Image (cartoon, coloured by chain):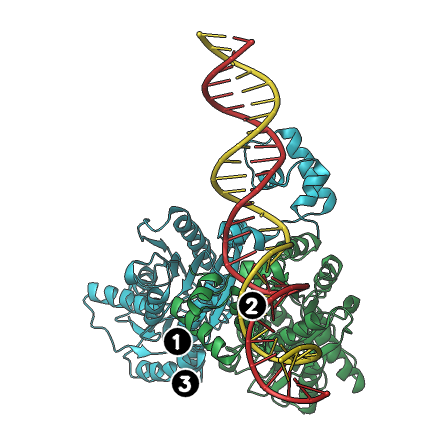
Chain colours: A cyan, B green, C red, D yellow
Amino acid sequence: MPVMADVARIAGVSHQTVSRVLNHHPNVRPATRDRVLAAIEELGYRRNLSARALVTRRTNTLGVVAFDTTLYGPASTLFGLEQAARDAGYFISIVSLKTINRKTVGEALDYLAAQAVDGLIAIAPQVEAAAAVSALRGNVPVVAVEGGEADGMPVVAVDQVRGAELATRHLLDLGHRTVWHVAGPADWLEAEGRRRGWRNVLAEARIDAPPVVEGDWSPRAGYTAGRRIADEARAGRASAVFVANDQMALGLLRALDEAGVRVPQDVSIVGFDDIPEAEFLTPPLTTVRQDFAEVGRKSIALLLDLIEAGPQAEPGRVVVPPAFVIRASTAPPRAT
Amino acid sequence: MPVMADVARIAGVSHQTVSRVLNHHPNVRPATRDRVLAAIEELGYRRNLSARALVTRRTNTLGVVAFDTTLYGPASTLFGLEQAARDAGYFISIVSLKTINRKTVGEALDYLAAQAVDGLIAIAPQVEAAAAVSALRGNVPVVAVEGGEADGMPVVAVDQVRGAELATRHLLDLGHRTVWHVAGPADWLEAEGRRRGWRNVLAEARIDAPPVVEGDWSPRAGYTAGRRIADEARAGRASAVFVANDQMALGLLRALDEAGVRVPQDVSIVGFDDIPEAEFLTPPLTTVRQDFAEVGRKSIALLLDLIEAGPQAEPGRVVVPPAFVIRASTAPPRAT
DNA sequence: GGCTCATGTGTGAACGTTAACAAACCGGGG
DNA sequence: CCCCGGTTTGTTAACGTTCACACATGAGCC
């Protein structure tokens, strides 16, 4: 493998001049630059990033701590993150956690610290995760994705509350007397936001909120919730449900079908996420779309700002608006 | 940040001894080792990987080239890969491609080469992708995941043919006269394998294969295929379908439902992948499960072997068996 | 013509680690 | 007592970059 000195020899300059060309230093005569570039081309030279990192103390690598990257949301965010980082000339190193607690988060940060990442993105959807990252980060800049406002960490997130409000209001506007809610796990920030948005709208409309049906995001939880909802529907107490994510909505749809409760004739359903499957469920699901790719891009942009600006930059919170997608799982109630 | 020399001073040894302790060199007196370890602990010292990489010429980083990591399969494989690499003390650098062709693959490999990765995993599900990677890799060891036997690259893959055979045979065993197939894109290796398995079983049973219905993995394609299948079913020509993946099966289910074709009474459906949603579709989907995590682990293991062994290692092909999961979308035909 | 100043280029020394070699130490056998 | 081999430790020189500085060169000005 050729090194800088080889290029320098071929181009008839010093290695320092080669370095200057590579780093786009202004004070290089065009003719010289061309000679160097030609030599680089000729030798197929690539600079050694380890050597560079050693002296500049920057690795050009960003660390990402994520949780269950198998789910559509995190996977899409990751994709956006990776894309944006690459465009910005950064490398990305990912740690996917199976469980989130202080210990696993600590190990993840250790692992990334070992790599001397220049910055950190924490996909920290749980209250505890955000806190753990905040507590354990050294003095690396950190951006939280979908995190809370915890401890002055800058945050990039979809406006969950607004999304939930759109969903709930849509159901009320259709004429439903009230809206049930199948929620995500209580310690997830997104679940909390969606719950709040739902509650906001009901409160505003002076409607007593039905009890929250707890779930864990999984289709199975949605199925279990669906049996409960089916009972309520048959008793005439439920005609509209806002489900905290599409996967649960899918399970719920299954349970309602089993119970002979028709959607949307008997019960209207709204989901959250707009997974690729949503459009092809039976019936096609009305849902709230999150632009995960945009979240990824915004996060990288914010993190790079932070790295440039140094620690004096103020936290800030970047919010990405959700979109509401109306399909066939919602309709006016039968007996208006 | 403390460096090796600082640790050495505190421990009263030379930096070289510190290095030896860190690298588990045998010839260090236990007492000395303990002193060094204590000093490391005291200072919170971590070694600088850039400096290490500079002199050892190994970055301890593995590159992964992937395609659409938003899908369940690739995302799960990635997760397994990441897990396994971390366990083995390696870092992972990922490039997710939006489109696969020689140019994009070339850029991806360039990007990873810039990082001087020690080895490469190519999630190369398309014929062309595998070829591109094979052609453009330098002399880095490469393992293809779900790739073809192209050009002597070692491959780790789920046995697609066998999975398809299990699915098709199951339908025939139930008494169906023939089995239709909704296939994936022709240039995907997995699609090809599943198609072959389906054809094998029909040929073995001396049944003329119905025309292949082409799809592109998406729920939408499944929906389109479903309208076709519904027509065939009403005409009494189709009572069983093997769909090349679960997402398409989902869309197909939707189309059949719309057309008033009942599953499994009128038509039996088998999918492929066992996505988390499969169990909660209406009806719960009989499908072929792929152990993506295992694929990830096996790939890393194979790649590390290759890195150790050097280029003389023979290619080899590691096959992960699929599992067949029977649920409620398959039944004997109505008129036996 | 000599001075200043900007521009372009080269020289040497880091950066923090590992590798190669050398030296010191220790116990045992002659 | 001395030499020999193995174990343990230290010294020095890489690895390939960038940074700080010094040195040319040439233009512009008095």
Distance Cα–Cα, label 2 vs label 3: 31 Å
- Is residue A157 positioned above or below A268 on the image? above
Amino acid on which the number 1 mark rests in the picture: Lys
Q: Which residue is mark 2?
A: B71
Using the image, determine if residue C14 lies above or below residue B90.
above
Which label was assigned to residue A259? Answer: 3
Q: Marks 2 and 1, how far apart in space?
A: 30 Å
Camera sees residue A237: yes
Of circles 2 and 1, the one toward us is: 1
Q: In the shown orientation, is residue A202 left or right of residue A10?
A: left
Q: Can residue B251 be seen from the camera position used here?
A: no
What chain does badge 1 belong to?
A: A
- The tag earlier along the polypeptide, 1 or 3, is 1
Q: Give the image quarter of residue A107.
A: bottom left
Q: Quadrant of the N terminus of chain B?
A: bottom left
Where residue B283 appears, as percent x and y from the top left, is: 52, 82
